[in-house]
Amino acid sequence: MRVYPTFFRLAFSWMDAERAHKIGFKGIRLAHRSGAGKVLATLTAPAPSLQTTAFGITFPSPFGLAAGFDKEGHGIEALTELGFGHVEVGTITGQAQPGNEKPRLFRLVEDRAVINRMGFNNDGATAVAPRLKAARAALQRQHRGVRPVIGVNIGKTKTVELADAVEDYLVSARSLAPAADYLVVNVSSPNTPGLRLLQDVESLRPLLTAVGQEADRSAGRHVPLLVKIAPDLSDEDIDDVARLALDLKLDGIIATNTTIARSGLSTPAEEVEKCGAGGLSGAPLKQRSLDVLRRLKQVTGDALTLVAVGGVETAQDVQDRLDAGATLVQGYTAFLYEGPFWAARINRELAKSRRP
């Protein structure tokens, strides 16, 4: 019997969503600091059969935690002890910023979804960089073989004009790339005004070129570079981004971020409207994110790594995305509803399906 859904209903469902997130995250980090996380890790470690190679890096599992949960690199080690094959930290900006006004995170429990307009609240690249470096070194010490992977997701500082966006992203790349296993350029959040305009290929080309060069220069090695796109792009724009990624020889594309759409929800329309603007994530995004993945696969073939995210709740969802052409799969929203053993359960079921 699964206990967490009942615990969530009693302990968290009535609470402000952002406060509940902070409490839950503190609990995960406390388990790590107390030493319980190390014991837990022996139970949640992915089976060796799940090891996956993407852009030259071996991941313990194809399933990882999407950006947004750990925005500032405070709990990387603790989260890997829950079974995630990788943790993508961020979104991190060149300058520290508080994000949008609260409340800014809302649950749609009937839809197993979340609406957020957090606005890239974070301590800034310079402050986060030492945490990433320390976490990476710790994971290398703790895992003699394949260790969990650290991804870093970077975005634009809200107060920086679009005309100066490239330099702002370079501040983050310069600080964070040396400690990142891979780097993601986020141009698809709906919560920073004008950000999605950077998905236009004419704006995206110089941005990705500059970030890629600066990341490699700062790190003294090639840092795999990916771009994260929105599910709200037209099919034509998806094709354009895919062709640009091929032309620039990017390492991958992450599909998809949250959506501004509100169609097909079970939650009453007036409740949804009360939440206001923001990106919708969770189960309602499942089909669209899968459709975008399939379209990207048609254009890119096997030339780069596709990372699927959006509406991922079960091991079958993960497998569906792997079958559709993804090499890696990420989740986030279902973590809030499924609890701390979610990743371990997905890994266990994936491993069972791979047994001869």
Image (cartoon, rainbow, N blue to C red):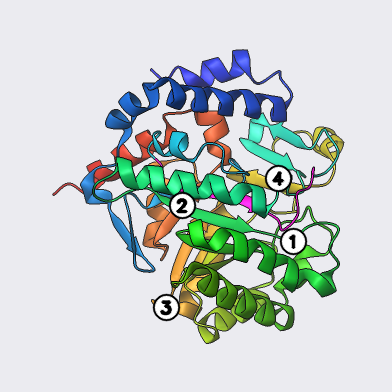
Q: Is residue 86 magenta?
A: yes
Residues shaded magenta: 84-98
Which of the 4 image quarters holds residue 153?
bottom right
Q: Nearer the viewer, residue 10 or 320?
A: 10
Label 4 belongs to which residue?
122
Mark 3 or mark 2: whose residue is earlier in sequence: 2
Crowding around mark 4 (Cα neighbors within 10 Å: few <14, some 14 to 19, many 20+) is many
Label 3 belongs to which residue?
301
Q: Is residue 327 magenta?
A: no
> Disc 3 marks which amino acid?
Gly
Residue 271 at x, y percent in the picture: 81, 32
Screen quadrant of the N terminus: top left
User: Helix, strand or loop at disc 1?
Assistant: loop
Mark 1 or mark 2: whose residue is earlier in sequence: 2
**What's the CA distance linking mark 1 and mark 4?**
12 Å
Label 2 belongs to which residue?
150
**What's the CA distance linking mark 3 and mark 4?**
36 Å
Q: Nearer the viewer, residue 191 or 145?
A: 145
Mark 3 or mark 4: whose residue is earlier in sequence: 4
User: Helix, strand or loop at disc 3?
Assistant: loop
